[in-house]
Each structure stands twice: as C-alpha cells, then as structure tokens.
Image (cartoon, coloured by chain):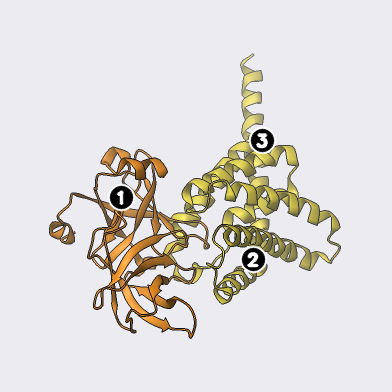
Chain colours: A yellow, B orange
Amino acid sequence: MTYGFYLLACLFLIVLQTAVMPTIPVLDRFFDLPAVFVIYLGLFRPIRECLPVTIVLGIIADNLSGAPFMLYTTSFIWLYLGVYWLKGVLQVGMRFRLPLIVSAGVLLENIIFIVTVGLLEPGSQSPVATAGTVITQLLWAFIIGPFLVIGFKYSHNFWDKLLGEVLIKRTDLTELEK
Amino acid sequence: MAFKTTLLSRSITAEVVGKDPSSWYQAIIINKGSEDGVQRGMPVVVPEGIAGQVTDTSSRYSKVMLIIDRNSAVDALVQRTRARGLIKGESSGRCVFNYVLRKNEVTVGDKIVASGLDGVFPKGFHIGDVTGVVRRVAGIFQEVTVTPYIDFEKLEEVLVIQTSPKPEFANQQ
C-alpha cells in the first residue's frame, strides 16, 4: 500500500514541477521537487523499499526533460545514497539538521548536473549564471525544503493510517459475514 | 493562429502543456504527437520566430528542445550583411552566434534570421537581435550575443512545421 503513496506522490510532484510551477514567475529557479522527495526517502525510509521508487521517479523525470537520458535517474540514486550516508554522519542540532541535509542534497544534485554539462558541452556554462542558479536553489532549499520533507512525512503517515483503518474495517466485515 | 495562414508548409498547432523539470536544460512538452503527424526533427515556430525543434515524440505528446538550450544549434545569417554563423543556446536564456568571421560586419541591433542551410529550420525565420559584439585582437571569430525575440517563459502555443525528414537525419536522431 505504501507504493500507492509513492506513485501518487511522484505523479503529483512531476505534474506540479512541469506544468504548474513554470507558470509562477517567482519559482522559475526553484529546486527540483522530486529531488526533495528522494531526500525524504533517504532520511526516513529503508533502501529496499526506496530504490525502485527512486529509479521510477528518475525515469519519469528523464522522459520529460531535455537532459541526457538517465541523468535524472543517476542523480536521484546518488542523491538517495548521499542523504542515507549523510544522516548518519551529520552531528548537528535538530534545528539545523534537516535544512542542512536538504541543502546538501540539492547541492549534490546540482553538482551532478553541472559536471555532466561541463563534460558534454565544455565552455557552454557561464560561471556567473551557474553560481546564481545554484545559490538561489540552495536558499530555497534551506528555507522551504525542510517543510516539504516534514509534509511528505505527515502525508505518508496519514496515508498509512487511513489505509490501515480501511483494512481493519474490511477485515471486521469479513469476519462478521463468516 | 492567423500566423498559420502565412506559412507555405503544412503545420500543426500545438499547446504547451509542460516544461523541463530541470533549470539546466530548456525543453517543453506539447500536446501533439506522432498520431497528429509530429515527427522528430521537425521545426517549431511562433509568430516571433523560431522556438525549437522536436526531439522526441509519443503518440499524443512531443518534447521540443528550445533554441536557448545549450544542445541546440541553428544555422543563421545576419539579415543586413548576410554574415553566417551558428546560433547556440546559453544557460542565461540568451544565445551566442558562433563562428562569425572577424572580417564580417556585425553590430548591436542587427537582426539574425535562419539561413535554411541546416536543413531543419526554414530560411528567413527570425531568431533575435544582436545585443553584444566582442571583437578580440587575436582570433578568427568574433563573439556575438543574441537575445531571442521569443519570451520563452510565456510560450503557450506553437506551430510544428511538417517537413519531410531526410532519411539520414532521421537515422542520426
């Protein structure tokens, strides 16, 4: 049932990122929302459950993007593993832990993209524009990212609780029928 | 779109339904696909000029790489002096006009149009205005910056021009 939540969340985030956010001028340099979902998975969910979700989300993003195919999938896998490792080693207070991890995740994704662009199209990047994009995304991630991660966590818990109640009701009804 | 009546080739009107999730690449999704006759390599235009090129199609949707994407290239001319070069996308939403010889005259304000020599974009379609020219002491070429006429942030409807794709080009894609 938890995969149902992942599927709905992935589709919702992709539609939001590709069809809704481009119409809002302030959010033209917003960070990748699917990346924050991968960060949530890395922080709170086990690997065996999340790697398939991360790969599917990456393939969906790859199909909609003009980036070289599999770049999103690769960056999401590295992002998941990076966050999974980082949460174990980062020893800071709870207040700053989440913003730092989300910012580090967004930075890691940007680094993967910049290195790829640099390797495939050397000299095509303006350092000023690149730095501007990265800094803006990091600021957004530091401020908004933690709230999104907490939102994902609450939504997931709510989904599990809701489905749990439905399943219990169904089981009770089946037992009564017997 | 009234613009459609001025085109000689057959064309397909399409709506923009999505944009690239990444800020590092510039692509859009349109609501017409192979069932509507859209094929890879077809040029995409709007009344202001060239918007991009179809890079992928599904049955009902297509992906269009915009001319401001760093992987895009359009063979182009300076309308006034006929100086030839290659329009390439830049990360800042502008384009650079590469391979323009130093001896050719290019000034700020010159209009850049498609040359038609790339076999993809129709000749004469507008691309943008020259907004910067740097002619260094050494070197064969000059550095020319071009600002496209199209506001890609506000792109809503486009026309896909139905050209018959060349077999070798279609194979390369």
Against A23, residue A178 (above or below) is: above
Q: Secondary structure at mark 1?
A: loop
Q: Secondary structure at mark 2?
A: helix
Residue A154 shows in this picture: no
> Where residue A120 appears, x then y in whole percent?
56, 57
Q: Which residue is mark 2?
A: A141
**Mark 3: few/some/many CA within 10 Å (<14, 14-19, 20+):** few
- Which chain's residue wears label 3? A
Q: Secondary structure at mark 3?
A: helix
> Where residue B169 appears, x then y in whole percent?
35, 45
Against A8, residue B157 (above or below) is: below
> Where residue A167 appears, x then y in whole percent?
64, 30
Which kind of residue does numbered mark 3 sit on? Gly
Q: Residue at x 61, y 26 (%)?
A: A170
Q: Quadrant of the C terminus of chain B?
A: top left
- Confirm whether circles 1 and 2 share one chain: no
> Where residue B134 appears, x then y in whole percent?
44, 83
Relative placement, left or right, of A55 versus B28 is right
Q: CA distance from mark 1 to mark 3?
A: 51 Å
**Mark 2: few/some/many CA within 10 Å (<14, 14-19, 20+):** many
Q: Residue at x 47, y 53 (%)?
A: A66
Q: Which residue is mark 1?
A: B42
Image marks 2 and 3: residues in contact by CB distance under 8 Å: no
Q: CA distance from mark 2 to mark 3?
A: 33 Å
Where on the picture, by quarter, is residue A19?
bottom left
- Confirm whether circles 2 and 3 share one chain: yes
Image marks 1 and 3: residues in contact by CB distance under 8 Å: no
Q: Nearer the viewer, residue A95 or A129?
A: A129
Q: Which residue is mark 3?
A: A164
**For marks 2 and 3 on the same chain, the one whose residue lies earlier in the sequence:** 2
Where on the picture, by quarter, is residue A53?
top right
Which kind of residue does numbered mark 1 sit on? Met
